[in-house]
Amino acid sequence: MELRGKPTAAGRAKAARTTPPDPALERPIPPQPPKPPPTPRARFLRRLGRTLLAALVTAAVVVPVSAAARPRIPAPAPAALAPPTTATLDKAYTANRANAAEASRMAAAHGDRTRAAADHAMAAPSRHFLTFDGRGQGLAVEVLGDLAHADRVAVLVPGSDTTLETYGRFRAGAAALQDHLDSLDHRHGTHRTHGTTLRPHTAVVAWLGYETPGTVSTTVLTTGRAEDAAPPLKRFIRELRGVVGEKAHVSLLCHSYGTVVCGRAARGLDVDDIALVGSPGTGADSVSALRTPARIWAARGADDWIVNVPHVHADLFGTTVGFGADPVSPAFGARVFAAGTGGHGDYFKPGSVSLDNLARIVLGDTSEVTRA
Protein backbone atom coordinates (compact mmCIF):
# COMPACT_ATOMS: atom_id res chain seq x y z
CA MET A 1 0.00 0.00 0.00
CA GLU A 2 1.33 3.44 -1.01
CA LEU A 3 1.00 6.15 1.50
CA ARG A 4 0.06 9.61 0.08
CA GLY A 5 0.29 12.85 2.07
CA LYS A 6 -0.82 16.38 1.23
CA PRO A 7 0.97 17.77 -1.84
CA THR A 8 3.84 20.08 -1.05
CA ALA A 9 4.22 23.62 -2.55
CA ALA A 10 6.96 22.29 -4.82
CA GLY A 11 4.68 19.53 -5.99
CA ARG A 12 1.88 21.94 -6.77
CA ALA A 13 4.26 24.16 -8.77
CA LYS A 14 5.53 21.11 -10.73
CA ALA A 15 1.96 20.04 -11.47
CA ALA A 16 1.12 23.54 -12.67
CA ARG A 17 4.12 23.45 -15.02
CA THR A 18 3.15 20.07 -16.46
CA THR A 19 -0.58 20.86 -16.87
CA PRO A 20 -1.33 21.12 -20.62
CA PRO A 21 -2.60 24.56 -21.74
CA ASP A 22 -6.30 25.03 -22.28
CA PRO A 23 -6.88 25.63 -26.03
CA ALA A 24 -9.76 28.01 -25.23
CA LEU A 25 -7.43 30.26 -23.26
CA GLU A 26 -4.83 30.28 -26.05
CA ARG A 27 -7.33 31.46 -28.66
CA PRO A 28 -6.32 34.96 -29.95
CA ILE A 29 -8.64 37.86 -29.07
CA PRO A 30 -10.19 39.24 -32.26
CA PRO A 31 -9.27 42.88 -32.95
CA GLN A 32 -11.88 45.40 -31.92
CA PRO A 33 -13.19 47.77 -34.61
CA PRO A 34 -11.91 51.34 -34.13
CA LYS A 35 -14.27 53.71 -32.40
CA PRO A 36 -15.73 56.35 -34.72
CA PRO A 37 -14.39 59.85 -34.11
CA PRO A 38 -16.64 62.02 -31.92
CA THR A 39 -19.09 64.21 -33.76
CA PRO A 40 -18.84 68.02 -33.49
CA ARG A 41 -21.86 67.91 -31.20
CA ALA A 42 -20.21 65.34 -28.90
CA ARG A 43 -16.96 67.33 -28.80
CA PHE A 44 -18.93 70.49 -28.06
CA LEU A 45 -20.86 68.85 -25.23
CA ARG A 46 -17.67 67.51 -23.65
CA ARG A 47 -16.02 70.92 -23.89
CA LEU A 48 -19.18 72.55 -22.61
CA GLY A 49 -19.22 70.22 -19.62
CA ARG A 50 -15.69 71.25 -18.70
CA THR A 51 -16.53 74.92 -19.19
CA LEU A 52 -19.67 74.69 -17.08
CA LEU A 53 -17.78 72.89 -14.32
CA ALA A 54 -15.08 75.56 -14.32
CA ALA A 55 -17.72 78.30 -14.30
CA LEU A 56 -19.61 76.69 -11.43
CA VAL A 57 -16.42 76.35 -9.40
CA THR A 58 -15.62 80.00 -10.15
CA ALA A 59 -19.14 81.05 -9.14
CA ALA A 60 -18.92 79.02 -5.95
CA VAL A 61 -15.49 80.30 -4.91
CA VAL A 62 -14.65 83.59 -6.61
CA VAL A 63 -18.00 85.34 -6.75
CA PRO A 64 -18.75 85.24 -2.98
CA VAL A 65 -15.24 86.50 -2.23
CA SER A 66 -15.55 89.29 -4.80
CA ALA A 67 -18.98 90.28 -3.52
CA ALA A 68 -17.67 90.44 0.02
CA ALA A 69 -14.67 92.47 -1.05
CA ARG A 70 -16.60 94.86 -3.25
CA PRO A 71 -20.16 95.78 -2.25
CA ARG A 72 -22.53 97.28 -4.80
CA ILE A 73 -21.43 100.76 -5.82
CA PRO A 74 -23.95 103.56 -5.21
CA ALA A 75 -24.83 105.82 -8.12
CA PRO A 76 -27.60 108.28 -9.00
CA ALA A 77 -30.52 107.31 -11.20
CA PRO A 78 -30.03 108.21 -14.88
CA ALA A 79 -31.07 111.65 -16.04
CA ALA A 80 -34.71 111.74 -17.15
CA LEU A 81 -34.54 112.77 -20.81
CA ALA A 82 -36.84 112.61 -23.79
CA PRO A 83 -35.63 110.86 -26.97
CA PRO A 84 -32.94 113.08 -28.47
CA THR A 85 -33.35 115.36 -31.47
CA THR A 86 -30.80 117.54 -33.21
CA ALA A 87 -32.07 120.46 -31.12
CA THR A 88 -31.70 118.63 -27.78
CA LEU A 89 -28.37 116.83 -28.22
CA ASP A 90 -26.39 119.41 -26.24
CA LYS A 91 -28.91 119.25 -23.41
CA ALA A 92 -28.54 115.46 -23.25
CA TYR A 93 -24.75 115.70 -23.29
CA THR A 94 -24.75 118.23 -20.44
CA ALA A 95 -27.18 116.24 -18.29
CA ASN A 96 -25.27 112.98 -18.69
CA ARG A 97 -21.93 114.62 -17.91
CA ALA A 98 -23.45 115.97 -14.69
CA ASN A 99 -24.77 112.50 -13.87
CA ALA A 100 -21.34 110.95 -14.44
CA ALA A 101 -19.75 113.57 -12.18
CA GLU A 102 -22.20 112.77 -9.40
CA ALA A 103 -21.62 109.04 -9.89
CA SER A 104 -17.88 109.66 -9.55
CA ARG A 105 -18.38 111.53 -6.27
CA MET A 106 -20.58 108.76 -4.88
CA ALA A 107 -18.15 106.02 -5.91
CA ALA A 108 -15.24 107.92 -4.36
CA ALA A 109 -17.17 108.37 -1.10
CA HIS A 110 -17.87 104.65 -1.18
CA GLY A 111 -14.15 103.93 -1.49
CA ASP A 112 -14.13 102.57 -5.04
CA ARG A 113 -11.33 104.49 -6.72
CA THR A 114 -11.48 102.49 -9.96
CA ARG A 115 -15.14 103.26 -10.63
CA ALA A 116 -14.72 106.84 -9.43
CA ALA A 117 -11.91 107.38 -11.94
CA ALA A 118 -13.92 105.83 -14.78
CA ASP A 119 -16.96 107.98 -14.02
CA HIS A 120 -14.80 111.08 -13.65
CA ALA A 121 -13.30 110.56 -17.11
CA MET A 122 -16.79 110.35 -18.57
CA ALA A 123 -17.73 113.67 -16.96
CA ALA A 124 -15.07 115.55 -18.95
CA PRO A 125 -16.41 118.51 -20.99
CA SER A 126 -15.28 116.90 -24.24
CA ARG A 127 -17.43 113.77 -23.75
CA HIS A 128 -20.86 113.43 -25.38
CA PHE A 129 -23.19 110.82 -23.88
CA LEU A 130 -26.71 110.12 -25.03
CA THR A 131 -27.12 107.77 -22.06
CA PHE A 132 -25.25 107.28 -18.81
CA ASP A 133 -26.21 104.97 -15.94
CA GLY A 134 -23.61 104.42 -13.23
CA ARG A 135 -25.58 101.73 -11.39
CA GLY A 136 -24.40 98.12 -11.37
CA GLN A 137 -22.03 97.28 -14.22
CA GLY A 138 -23.09 100.55 -15.81
CA LEU A 139 -24.51 101.59 -19.17
CA ALA A 140 -23.22 104.29 -21.50
CA VAL A 141 -23.96 105.42 -25.05
CA GLU A 142 -21.34 107.86 -26.30
CA VAL A 143 -21.12 109.90 -29.50
CA LEU A 144 -17.82 110.59 -31.25
CA GLY A 145 -18.11 113.10 -34.05
CA ASP A 146 -20.89 115.48 -35.05
CA LEU A 147 -24.07 113.43 -34.83
CA ALA A 148 -26.33 116.40 -35.58
CA HIS A 149 -24.92 116.70 -39.11
CA ALA A 150 -23.83 113.13 -39.78
CA ASP A 151 -24.97 111.26 -42.85
CA ARG A 152 -22.73 108.21 -42.18
CA VAL A 153 -23.14 106.71 -38.71
CA ALA A 154 -21.54 103.64 -37.16
CA VAL A 155 -23.01 102.03 -34.04
CA LEU A 156 -20.59 99.74 -32.20
CA VAL A 157 -21.96 96.90 -30.04
CA PRO A 158 -19.40 95.35 -27.65
CA GLY A 159 -18.94 91.82 -26.39
CA SER A 160 -18.40 90.25 -22.99
CA ASP A 161 -16.71 91.88 -19.99
CA THR A 162 -17.48 95.43 -21.13
CA THR A 163 -18.44 97.54 -18.11
CA LEU A 164 -17.84 101.11 -17.00
CA GLU A 165 -14.49 99.99 -15.58
CA THR A 166 -13.39 98.46 -18.89
CA TYR A 167 -15.21 100.99 -21.08
CA GLY A 168 -11.94 102.71 -22.01
CA ARG A 169 -10.80 99.89 -24.29
CA PHE A 170 -14.20 99.78 -26.02
CA ARG A 171 -14.11 103.54 -26.54
CA ALA A 172 -10.56 103.32 -27.89
CA GLY A 173 -11.85 101.17 -30.76
CA ALA A 174 -14.65 103.63 -31.48
CA ALA A 175 -12.18 106.53 -31.45
CA ALA A 176 -9.84 104.68 -33.82
CA LEU A 177 -12.72 104.16 -36.23
CA GLN A 178 -13.75 107.83 -36.06
CA ASP A 179 -10.16 108.93 -36.67
CA HIS A 180 -9.89 106.64 -39.68
CA LEU A 181 -13.21 107.85 -41.06
CA ASP A 182 -11.97 111.43 -40.73
CA SER A 183 -8.81 110.56 -42.64
CA LEU A 184 -10.79 108.89 -45.40
CA ASP A 185 -13.28 111.78 -45.56
CA HIS A 186 -10.59 114.10 -46.88
CA ARG A 187 -10.04 111.76 -49.83
CA HIS A 188 -13.68 110.86 -50.40
CA GLY A 189 -15.55 113.37 -52.59
CA THR A 190 -19.06 112.23 -53.42
CA HIS A 191 -20.31 114.79 -55.91
CA ARG A 192 -20.07 118.45 -56.76
CA THR A 193 -22.71 121.11 -56.33
CA HIS A 194 -22.02 124.68 -57.54
CA GLY A 195 -18.32 123.84 -57.78
CA THR A 196 -18.10 122.54 -54.18
CA THR A 197 -17.05 118.97 -53.33
CA LEU A 198 -19.43 117.45 -50.78
CA ARG A 199 -17.91 114.97 -48.37
CA PRO A 200 -19.79 112.70 -45.98
CA HIS A 201 -20.12 113.75 -42.36
CA THR A 202 -19.46 110.85 -40.02
CA ALA A 203 -20.16 109.95 -36.42
CA VAL A 204 -19.48 106.85 -34.33
CA VAL A 205 -21.68 105.75 -31.45
CA ALA A 206 -20.23 103.46 -28.77
CA TRP A 207 -23.34 101.61 -27.57
CA LEU A 208 -22.88 99.97 -24.19
CA GLY A 209 -26.62 99.69 -23.81
CA TYR A 210 -26.84 96.27 -22.18
CA GLU A 211 -25.38 94.27 -19.32
CA THR A 212 -22.66 92.20 -20.96
CA PRO A 213 -21.88 88.67 -19.74
CA GLY A 214 -18.56 87.74 -18.20
CA THR A 215 -16.17 85.87 -20.46
CA VAL A 216 -15.77 83.16 -17.79
CA SER A 217 -19.42 82.54 -17.01
CA THR A 218 -22.32 80.34 -18.01
CA THR A 219 -24.25 83.36 -19.34
CA VAL A 220 -21.74 83.88 -22.14
CA LEU A 221 -22.72 80.46 -23.53
CA THR A 222 -26.40 81.31 -24.02
CA THR A 223 -28.51 83.92 -25.80
CA GLY A 224 -30.16 85.18 -22.59
CA ARG A 225 -28.28 88.47 -22.29
CA ALA A 226 -28.62 89.04 -26.05
CA GLU A 227 -32.38 88.56 -25.91
CA ASP A 228 -32.55 91.13 -23.10
CA ALA A 229 -30.35 93.53 -25.10
CA ALA A 230 -32.20 93.32 -28.42
CA PRO A 231 -35.22 95.52 -27.47
CA PRO A 232 -33.11 98.45 -26.18
CA LEU A 233 -30.88 98.23 -29.26
CA LYS A 234 -33.92 98.34 -31.54
CA ARG A 235 -35.29 101.28 -29.58
CA PHE A 236 -31.98 103.11 -29.83
CA ILE A 237 -31.81 102.69 -33.61
CA ARG A 238 -35.32 104.16 -33.88
CA GLU A 239 -34.28 107.13 -31.75
CA LEU A 240 -31.08 107.53 -33.77
CA ARG A 241 -33.13 107.78 -36.95
CA GLY A 242 -35.03 110.60 -35.27
CA VAL A 243 -31.75 112.51 -35.05
CA VAL A 244 -29.99 111.69 -38.34
CA GLY A 245 -33.04 111.12 -40.56
CA GLU A 246 -34.02 108.27 -42.84
CA LYS A 247 -31.50 109.13 -45.56
CA ALA A 248 -28.44 108.71 -43.37
CA HIS A 249 -26.37 105.57 -43.89
CA VAL A 250 -26.35 103.64 -40.59
CA SER A 251 -24.04 100.68 -39.99
CA LEU A 252 -24.14 98.30 -37.02
CA LEU A 253 -20.67 96.96 -36.15
CA CYS A 254 -20.88 94.06 -33.72
CA HIS A 255 -18.01 92.33 -31.92
CA SER A 256 -17.86 88.90 -30.23
CA TYR A 257 -20.94 88.38 -27.99
CA GLY A 258 -22.23 91.66 -29.44
CA THR A 259 -22.84 89.73 -32.68
CA VAL A 260 -25.34 87.58 -30.78
CA VAL A 261 -27.07 90.78 -29.65
CA CYS A 262 -27.17 92.07 -33.23
CA GLY A 263 -28.46 88.74 -34.47
CA ARG A 264 -31.35 88.92 -32.01
CA ALA A 265 -32.11 92.56 -32.94
CA ALA A 266 -31.62 92.23 -36.71
CA ARG A 267 -35.16 91.43 -37.76
CA GLY A 268 -36.66 94.53 -39.38
CA LEU A 269 -33.89 96.76 -37.99
CA ASP A 270 -33.58 100.05 -39.88
CA VAL A 271 -29.87 99.89 -40.69
CA ASP A 272 -28.04 99.60 -43.99
CA ASP A 273 -25.21 97.27 -42.99
CA ILE A 274 -24.49 94.84 -40.17
CA ALA A 275 -20.87 93.73 -39.72
CA LEU A 276 -20.09 90.71 -37.51
CA VAL A 277 -16.47 90.48 -36.33
CA GLY A 278 -14.98 87.83 -34.05
CA SER A 279 -18.37 86.14 -33.88
CA PRO A 280 -19.16 82.90 -32.02
CA GLY A 281 -22.38 82.79 -34.07
CA THR A 282 -25.55 84.83 -34.11
CA GLY A 283 -28.11 82.25 -33.10
CA ALA A 284 -29.24 82.09 -36.74
CA ASP A 285 -28.21 79.48 -39.29
CA SER A 286 -28.02 81.84 -42.26
CA VAL A 287 -28.31 85.42 -43.40
CA SER A 288 -31.87 84.81 -44.52
CA ALA A 289 -32.78 83.59 -41.03
CA LEU A 290 -31.82 87.02 -39.64
CA ARG A 291 -34.75 88.48 -41.60
CA THR A 292 -33.20 91.84 -42.26
CA PRO A 293 -32.90 93.92 -45.43
CA ALA A 294 -29.43 95.07 -44.32
CA ARG A 295 -26.27 93.83 -46.00
CA ILE A 296 -24.57 91.30 -43.71
CA TRP A 297 -20.78 91.28 -43.47
CA ALA A 298 -18.52 88.99 -41.47
CA ALA A 299 -14.81 88.71 -40.71
CA ARG A 300 -12.43 86.82 -38.46
CA GLY A 301 -8.75 87.56 -37.85
CA ALA A 302 -6.23 84.81 -38.47
CA ASP A 303 -5.17 84.78 -34.79
CA ASP A 304 -8.65 85.04 -33.26
CA TRP A 305 -9.23 82.29 -30.67
CA ILE A 306 -12.96 82.42 -31.44
CA VAL A 307 -12.23 79.98 -34.29
CA ASN A 308 -12.09 77.22 -31.64
CA VAL A 309 -15.70 77.77 -30.54
CA PRO A 310 -17.93 74.97 -31.93
CA HIS A 311 -20.71 76.36 -34.10
CA VAL A 312 -23.59 74.19 -32.90
CA HIS A 313 -26.76 74.42 -30.83
CA ALA A 314 -27.46 72.18 -27.86
CA ASP A 315 -30.46 72.08 -25.55
CA LEU A 316 -29.44 71.56 -21.93
CA PHE A 317 -31.99 71.62 -19.12
CA GLY A 318 -34.37 73.69 -21.24
CA THR A 319 -31.71 76.24 -22.21
CA THR A 320 -30.20 76.60 -25.68
CA VAL A 321 -26.43 76.65 -25.44
CA GLY A 322 -24.24 77.71 -28.38
CA PHE A 323 -24.92 80.07 -31.26
CA GLY A 324 -25.15 77.97 -34.41
CA ALA A 325 -23.60 78.56 -37.80
CA ASP A 326 -20.25 80.25 -38.33
CA PRO A 327 -20.90 83.68 -39.91
CA VAL A 328 -17.74 83.44 -42.05
CA SER A 329 -18.70 80.05 -43.50
CA PRO A 330 -19.96 80.01 -47.10
CA ALA A 331 -23.18 78.32 -45.98
CA PHE A 332 -24.10 81.27 -43.78
CA GLY A 333 -24.15 83.61 -46.77
CA ALA A 334 -22.52 86.78 -45.39
CA ARG A 335 -20.15 89.01 -47.33
CA VAL A 336 -16.85 87.87 -45.84
CA PHE A 337 -14.16 90.55 -45.75
CA ALA A 338 -10.47 90.47 -44.86
CA ALA A 339 -9.43 91.02 -41.25
CA GLY A 340 -5.71 90.38 -41.53
CA THR A 341 -3.67 88.54 -38.93
CA GLY A 342 -5.22 90.17 -35.88
CA GLY A 343 -6.52 88.50 -32.75
CA HIS A 344 -9.88 88.73 -31.00
CA GLY A 345 -9.33 92.27 -29.72
CA ASP A 346 -7.69 93.73 -32.83
CA TYR A 347 -10.58 94.47 -35.20
CA PHE A 348 -10.52 98.21 -34.42
CA LYS A 349 -6.75 98.46 -34.08
CA PRO A 350 -5.33 101.54 -35.84
CA GLY A 351 -3.67 100.63 -39.12
CA SER A 352 -5.30 97.21 -39.33
CA VAL A 353 -6.89 95.70 -42.43
CA SER A 354 -10.10 95.08 -40.52
CA LEU A 355 -10.42 98.72 -39.38
CA ASP A 356 -9.95 99.97 -42.92
CA ASN A 357 -12.61 97.61 -44.23
CA LEU A 358 -15.03 98.51 -41.46
CA ALA A 359 -14.56 102.19 -42.30
CA ARG A 360 -15.30 101.44 -45.97
CA ILE A 361 -18.51 99.70 -44.95
CA VAL A 362 -19.54 102.68 -42.82
CA LEU A 363 -18.89 105.07 -45.73
CA GLY A 364 -20.87 102.88 -48.11
CA ASP A 365 -17.77 102.19 -50.25
CA THR A 366 -18.64 98.53 -50.65
CA SER A 367 -16.54 98.15 -53.81
CA GLU A 368 -13.47 99.25 -51.79
CA VAL A 369 -13.87 96.51 -49.16
CA THR A 370 -11.24 93.79 -49.58
CA ARG A 371 -12.80 90.36 -49.49
CA ALA A 372 -11.36 87.33 -47.72
Image: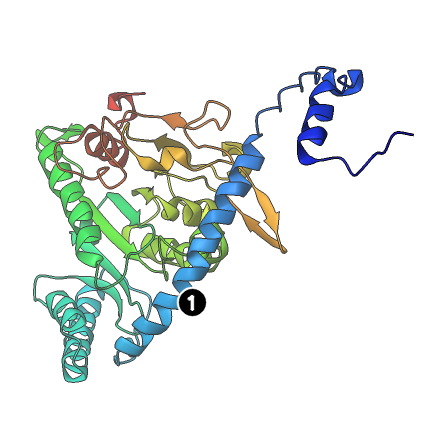
Residue 228 as seen in the image, left or right of residue 82: right
Q: Which residue is mark 1?
A: 60
Residue 47 as seen in the image, left or right of residue 353: right
> With respect to residue 213, does 202 lie above or below?
above
Locate residue 276: give its quadrant.
top left
Locate residue 369: give its quadrant.
top left
Q: Residue furthest right?
A: 1
Residue at 15% in and 84% down: 109
> With respect to residue 161, does 95 lie above or below?
below
Residue at 51% in and 24% down: 331
Residue 275 as seen in the image, left or right of residue 112: right
Q: Is residue 161 visible?
A: yes
Locate residue 143: give its quadrant.
bottom left
In this orientation, which residue lies closer to the viewer: 35 or 319? 35
**Quadrant in which the N terminus is drawn:** top right
> With respect to residue 96, does 351 lie above or below?
above
Q: In the image, residue 96 lies at what x, y percent?
A: 20, 71
Q: Residue furthest bottom?
A: 109
Secondary structure found at label 1: helix
Q: In the image, residue 296 lies at what x, y percent?
A: 41, 33
Q: In the image, residue 194 lies at what x, y percent?
A: 11, 31
Q: In the image, residue 302 lies at what x, y percent?
A: 28, 27
Task: State the colouring used for the structure image.
Answer: rainbow
Residue at 39% in and 44% down: 259
Q: Is residue 229 visible?
A: no
